[in-house]
Image: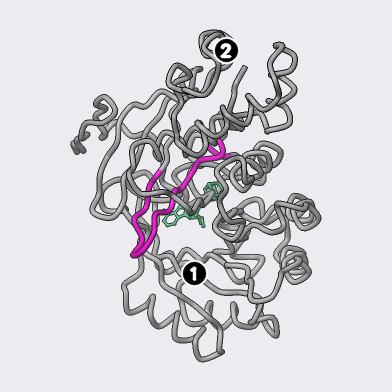
Amino acid sequence: MELLSLNRQELRKYMESLGYEPFRADQILKWVYKKFTTDFSSMSDVPKKLREELPKLLSVHCLEPLGRVPAPDAVKYMFRTRDGHLVETVLIKERDHLTLCVSSQVGCAVGCTFCATAVDGLRRNLEVHEILDQFLQVQRDTSERIRNVVFMGMGEPLANYENVKRASEIMVSPWGLDLSKRRITISTSGLIRQLEKMASDRVMKELNLAVSLNAPSQELRERIMPIAKTNPLKELMRVLVNFPLSRYRRITLEYVLIKDLNDGPEHARELVRLIGKYRKRFKVNLIPYNPDPVLPYERPTLDRVYEFQKVLWKANLSALVRFSKGADVFGACGQLRNRSVVKFKPHGQESEVGR
Ligand code: SAH
Ligand code: SF4
């Protein structure tokens, strides 16, 4: 059984079923989620007999570390699942904290035309323990505590709703990773039905929400994000406008700026009109496109990026330009896909990037 997919109540019940007191579960969870010790033999307050039994009953790590690629302000980790899929996770060094960008699926079925993750389609959803093990393994390799998680790696988190929900619940539980709900961000391409589900879910509705808008009109959005056909922009905006937000909380609209496609001042004006009177509810993140060798898109000049931003500012919208960290070395969010250019070396050693 996978320890990381169990919640506290389930592990307590399991301990009872083995003939142990339920509080043994709390001891184990403390070692795993507070001390990041995943070796049962060193859980010193757990009775010796149980310590010896546990490795046969429960497994903690399910991902095999393949290597890490360091960049000046980020480290990319590569893992292999038991059935041989590659999973990528990026640790991002912000000015005063660390953020972990986790994957929720192997590949993605959404099919955005500009995104490298979409190229091979969806292989499968990641399980709860595979999502959490990305955190545990990177945390074990990092001296500073990671307190921020963004679901911006491979995959569409809301297309793997139940697993992302359970993993997030364990992340925010006091007995689990004990992260603040505000420090977990779900980034979605805008799946309307799942967003409605999220809006009425006790834990999910409290998490940060980022929506990849990427275009200000239905027509343009459909061209680069095929899911827009079944998830129309008008309806998406209606759901976002009604999404429950506590005071001071805002929804992030992500907008990847692609040269000569969606990066003109006329697009910025259209975006202003789309947001209309709801400008206090949203903030816009402008992400200059990271070109990819297999995709026909380019990054606009910085002048053009700032011109776009100025139009939003003039309309009193809050808009930040965000450069994806580590992009020069290994691509970035949306580009996390195994490439032959990366030579794997065992975990803990530097990996090379050979082009
Ligand atoms: N599937 C989710 C989360 C993963 S993608 C989503 O789409 O939101 C995370 C972000 O990376 C999205 O905002 C996406 O638009 C962006 N992205 C994808 N490819 C990119 C690229 N080549 N350059 C810059 N951003 C990219
Ligand atoms: Fe999937 Fe997000 Fe990439 Fe679109 S941008 S294909 S939703 S990972």
Amino acid type of the residue that numbered disc 1 sits on in the rendered structure: Asn
Estimate how packed mark 2 is, as few (under 14), some (14 to 19) or many (20 or more) residues with alpha carbons within 10 Å: some
Q: Is any atom of residue 199 visible in this view?
A: yes
What is the number of callouts on the image?
2
The residue tagged 1 is 285
Q: Nearer the viewer, residue 278 or 39?
A: 39
Q: Nearer the viewer, residue 47 or 293?
A: 47
Label 1, secondary structure: give it.
Answer: strand
What is the quadrant of the C terminus in the image?
A: top left
Measured Cα–Cα span from mark 1 to mark 2 = 50 Å
Amino acid type of the residue that numbered disc 2 sits on in the rendered structure: Leu
Q: Nearer the viewer, residue 1 or 274?
A: 1
Please tell me whether residue 67 belongs to the stretch shown in magenta: no
Label 2, secondary structure: give it.
Answer: helix
Residue 69 in the image: state x and y as whole percent: 27, 40
Residue 21 in the image: state x and y as whole percent: 70, 20
Please tell me whether residue 107 belongs to the stretch shown in magenta: yes
The residue tagged 2 is 50
Question: In the image, what residue occupies the spot 59% across and 77% down?
Answer: 271
Q: Nearer the viewer, residue 293 or 156?
A: 156
Describe residue 60's horizontal placement relative to residue 95 as left or right. right
Farthest residue to the bottom: give it: 314
Looking at the rendered image, the disc whose residue lies closer to the viewer, 1 or 2, is: 2
Q: Is mark 2 within 8 Å of ligand 1?
A: no
Question: In the image, what residue occupies the spot 74% across and 17% down?
Answer: 16
